[in-house]
Image: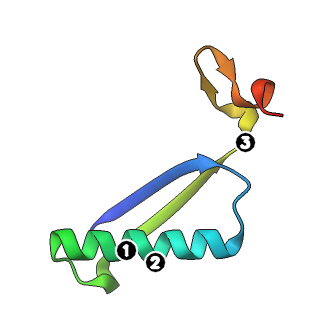
Amino acid sequence: MPYVTVKMIEGRTDDQKRELVKKVTDAVSETTGAPREKVAVIIEEMSPANYGVNGERISDVMP
């Protein structure tokens, strides 16, 4: 049973997350041969204050 974790900054809509889960499930099933019903996708959302790139928190550089 494949488990896929997607980590991303919070702020996506439910529709965007729904489509992400569908497309990731399809891609994993097609490439590994795993049945779709056995593919688990976990979305972990992070606050921009808890994520940094290039020495700066995203929340400090986002408009």
Which residue is drawn at the image coordinates 69% and 73% (left, top)?
Answer: 14
Please provide percent x and percent y for residue 45: 63, 51
Q: Are marks 1 and 3 in contact (CB under 8 Å)?
A: no
Residue position for label 1: 25
Q: CA distance from mark 2 to mark 3?
A: 24 Å
Q: Are marks 2 and 3 in contact (CB under 8 Å)?
A: no
As drawn, the label of residue 45 is none
Give the residue type that dot 1 points to.
Thr
Q: Secondary structure at mark 1?
A: helix
Q: Are marks 2 and 1 in contact (CB under 8 Å)?
A: yes
Q: Is residue 12 above or below residue 35?
A: above
Please provide percent x and percent y for residue 1: 25, 71
Q: Is residue 31 above or below residue 44?
A: below
Tell me: 63 left or right of 25: right
Q: CA distance from mark 1 to mark 3?
A: 25 Å
Binning the other alpha carbons within 10 Å of mark 1 as few (below 14), some (14 to 19) or many (20 upward) gives: many
As drawn, the label of residue 47 is 3
**Lower position in the chain sequence, tag 2 or tag 3:** 2
Which residue is drawn at the image coordinates 15% and 77% (left, top)?
Answer: 33
Binning the other alpha carbons within 10 Å of mark 3 as few (below 14), some (14 to 19) or many (20 upward) gives: few
Give the residue type that dot 3 points to.
Ser
Give the residue type that dot 2 points to.
Lys
Please provide percent x and percent y for residue 17: 60, 69
